[in-house]
Amino acid sequence: MSDSVPSSPPATTVRPTLTELFVAFVQVALSGFGGALPWARRMVVEKKKWMTAEEFNEAFALSQFLPGPNVVNFSVVFGGRFGGAPGAMVALAGLLGPPMLIATVLAVLYAQFGDLQTIGRILAGVTAAATGLLIAMVGKMAAPLFKRLSWAPLVAAAAFAGVALMHYPLPLVFIVLAPVSIAITWFYPVTR
Amino acid sequence: MNSPLVSIAGYFALLSLFAVGGANAAIPEMHRVAVDVMHWMSDKQFADSFAIAQMSPGPNVIIVTLIGYHVAGLAGAAVATVAMCGPTCAAAFIVSRLWDRFKQAHWRIAVQGGLVPVSLGMIAASAFVLARSADHSVLAAAITVATAVIGFATRLNPLWLFAAGGLLGLSGWL
């Protein structure tokens, strides 16, 4: 692992081993009904304390603006930061491997029996809970933004309104808001 | 056997590069190609694959595994998943490496600080969209609100809330 030590060690005190990374992302994947993101934050920030709330926000924002599935990107960014290329690969394998297996088995069962009604009803309840969990996570991610006086809550509100209320395409909202937000941060830096 | 695998690989690799905003943002485009253009599957089969992907734990991108499986069996499942995730994962790895190198640069601090609130607003928007489609009844909305409050304020494992939601759903009250 000598050549795969990350160039900039994170500020947190605990560092996961490759095995811990793999197991953690398997757990995230297996808990993540209705979206794995809240579970990734819960694991990384709350349970393992591998990242602070701010570090998670920053790493996730980066993952979100790269093309491809967000949580998948996050596993690569996170694994890479702590364990180089091997770290990125084990985190990715942990996140994608078990769900691929389960989904394929479900697809085979479905082809055999073909009744999604019962599962669909259970799923409706699970989705309602998963939505609540996502809302809770938004609240937690927003908390660091409100700690100090800044423009950030206004920008977040504008992004929310553009996508959720005005139904503008996501890339459009991003192309308009990101430069504005970056310019604000450039000219009015927040002192930590 | 060879040609469907090649077209799956090419199509998903291409799609992944434009899938800014996650797998769910790319669903309409997947539907267009898999059903209308390539005739890999029927409309109902696509809807069922989407439902199965939602049911499975883990990232929603798993729907590409199912489309691949439908077209070319286990090999198709593997090829579709690798094609959808491989190129963007490599990009994510390289960009995050470069990103860390400029940790102290003024422009990087501004870009990163500027992206965080935009990102947060977009996640909030997807929670809003999800809530509107999931909460058809008062009880379903109550489950969402209860999970949001408990998830924000306590350290209870949310799987208990998922189990409660699933049981209520099974009972047919939602």
Image (tube, coloured by chain):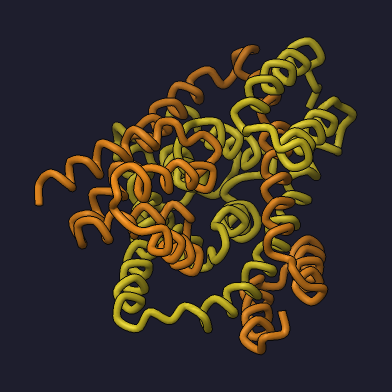
Chain colours: A yellow, B orange
Report the residue that reaches farthest toward the right: A149
User: Residue A69 location in percent, x, y?
Assistant: 47, 43
In the rendered image, the quadrant that contains the C terminus of chain A is top right
Above/below status of B146 relative to A7: below
Above/below status of A169 relative to A70: above
The answer to which image quadrant residue B120 occupies is top right
Question: Can residue A26 be seen in the rendering of this structure?
Answer: no
B173 relative position to B15: left or right = right
Question: Can residue A101 be seen in the rendering of this structure?
Answer: yes
Report the residue that reaches farthest toward the left: B1
Above/below status of B37 relative to A110: above
User: Residue A152 location in percent, x, y?
Assistant: 80, 29
Identify the residue at image location x=73%, y=63%. Answer: A132
Above/below status of B80 relative to A188: below
The answer to which image quadrant residue B3 occupies is top left
Q: Nearer the viewer, residue A34 or B102?
A: A34
Q: Nearer the viewer, residue B85 or A147?
A: B85
Identify the residue at image location x=74%, y=65%. Answer: B151
B59 relative position to A98: left or right = right
The answer to which image quadrant residue B78 occupies is bottom left
Identify the residue at image location x=80%, y=22%. Answer: A190
User: Residue A3 location in percent, x, y?
Assistant: 29, 32
Report the residue that reaches farthest toward the bottom: B171
User: Residue A175 location in percent, x, y?
Assistant: 63, 21
Q: Nearer the viewer, residue B130 or A23?
A: B130
B29 relative position to A53: left or right = left
Q: Nearer the viewer, residue B96 or B7?
A: B7
Identify the residue at image location x=72%, y=68%. Answer: B155
